[in-house]
Amino acid sequence: MDEEKIMVTFWDLAAFFVGVMGFFAVVYFLGRGEGRKKREALFPFVSGEEYHPMRIPYRVKWIYYVALFTMFETAGLLVMLALSARIPMIIPAIYIAILSLSLLIAPKE
């Protein structure tokens, strides 16, 4: 049984990109609504009550760890793809080495 290879050309990718951009352009223009809002609608409290803006506490250091977790998940996918394509493991090895170095320079608590 012959296996057919599926070839993806530049024009296939270009048509996909244009289709996705067209879809999101239609969604954007449908969601714009009618004109500008009235000035009163933009205020949080129109009854005249004064409020103090609240600052939401968060730690910027945790953003680094979330990004590193995402990159390590990507590294696993990259290794699996490299193994299935039977290519040398040098690219995933370099990627994992850079990630390991980024763990050393990540902010400490």
Image (cartoon, helix red, strand yellow):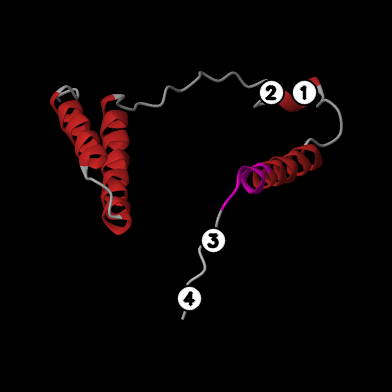
| Mark closer to the observer (1, 3) | 3
Q: Is mark 1 on a helix, strand or loop?
A: helix
- Main SS, magenta residues: helix
Nearer-N-terminus badge (2/3): 3
Q: In which quarter of the image is residue 7?
A: bottom right
The residue that label 2 is drawn on is 43
The residue carrying mark 3 is 6
Who comes first in sequence, dot 1 or dot 3? 3
x then y, percent, for residue 21: 69, 40
Tell me if label 2 and label 1 are in contact, CB under 8 Å: yes
Q: Which of 72 and 77 is in front in this view?
A: 77
> Bounds of the magenta span?
8-14
Figure check: 41 above or below 71: above
Tell me, for residue 80, which label it has, or none.
Answer: none
Q: Name the residue under label 4.
A: 2
Residue 12 shown in magenta: yes
Residues at marks 1 and 4, CA–CA distance in whole angstroms = 69 Å
Alpha carbon distance from label 2 to label 3:
56 Å
Density class for disc 4 (Cα within 10 Å; few <14, some 14-19, many ≥20) is: few
The residue located at (26%, 26%) in the rendering is 61
Give me the C-alpha separation between circle 1 and circle 3.
57 Å
Residue at left 42%, top 22%? Answer: 55
